[in-house]
Amino acid sequence: MANPDSVLADPAMPSEGLAIHHPTLPAVVADRLRQLIVNGTLRPGTWLNERDLCDLLKVSRTPLREAYRILASDGLLSIQPKRGAMVIELSREDIENTFDVLSVLEGLAVRQAAQRATDAELAHIGQLHRRMLQGYEARDIATYFEASMGTHIAISRAAHNPALVASYDRLNLQVQALRYKSNLDPDEWAAGVADHEAIVQALLVRDGERAEQLMREHLYSKKAYNLR
């Protein structure tokens, strides 16, 4: 999965000095593994096979193990001596607690974005939302999910609250696989699209109170679905 910041870069913000033009190999490998975890190819509770992954990704064990450490710091992998790395499986309590906190963080983010976002940032969020709708209409889940998550991340950046972003990024990574999986249910996917439409429209008219309420309800719905 692409680096979230690359999805949401503010078009009005100069990129000089910010872009990473030559990411390290471990970072690239970590990005690919993250994508495999999110889309369910590497399922929760799975022990990773180094040889198979080296063959799949065409890399040696050194960058692969460095990538493991990156994903462990993200809370996606557990590394155990002499056993290797395992995809972390969230308990019901983990899911409930994480979505409860995310509902507060994302609710605050969208309210502050309504207050603080530049017009260019709001226009960018609108563009991501339209791309998400196009992905949904085409039933292209990969395009849809990238734009959907890009919208959420762009909203968090538009809040201009570094403390919020730091907390949000880590928690969001840990439940992206659950958020992706929910879209495999046609009814849940349609409900998510409707939620996004209402949230973005409230944000674009800078109705922070309504946007926050809708965002919290959206996250509560995701929590309920994943606890069924």
Image (cartoon, helix red, strand yellow):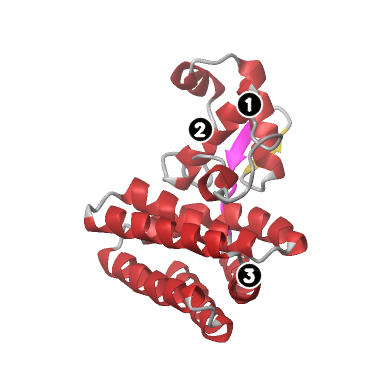
Name the residue rendered at 57%, 85% in the picture: 209
Residue at image coords 29%, 68%: 190
Residue under circle 2? 32
Q: Say what secondary structure mark 3 lies in.
A: helix
Q: Is residue 177 above or below residue 114?
A: above
**Disc number placed over residue 109 in the picture, else none:** 3
Query: Which region of the structure is painted magenta?
Result: 84-90
**Along the line of sight, which residue is nearer the eye, 82 or 182?**
182
Q: Earlier in the sequence, mark 1 or mark 2?
A: 1
Whether pointer 3 and pointer 1 mark residues with C-beta atoms closer than 8 Å, the reply is no
Residue at 71% from the left image edge and 43% from the top image edge: 73
Q: Which residue is mark 1?
A: 23
Q: Residue sitting at 65 percent across and 55 percent down?
A: 169
- Mark 2 and mark 3: Cα distance apart in space: 28 Å
Q: Examine the structure image and report whether residue 24 is included in the region drawn in magenta.
A: no
Q: Quadrant of the C terminus?
A: bottom left
Confirm whether residue 47 shows in the render: no
Quick one: 67 or 192, which is closer to the camera? 192
> In terms of depth relative to the viewer, which is nearer, 28 or 41?
28
> Which numbered disc covers residue 60?
none
Q: What is the x, y in percent for residue 198?
A: 40, 77
Mark closest to the chain's N terminus, 3 or 1: 1
Q: Position of residue 212 (x, y in %)?
A: 56, 80
Q: Secondary structure at mark 1?
A: loop
Disc 3 marks which amino acid?
Ala
Q: Position of residue 2 (x, y in %)?
A: 51, 39
- Type of the residue with mark 2: Arg
Few, some or many residues within 10 Å of mark 3 (<14, 14–19, 20+): many
Give the mark nearer the N terminus: 2 vs 3.
Answer: 2
- Secondary element type, mark 2: helix
Q: Quadrant of residue 119?
A: bottom right
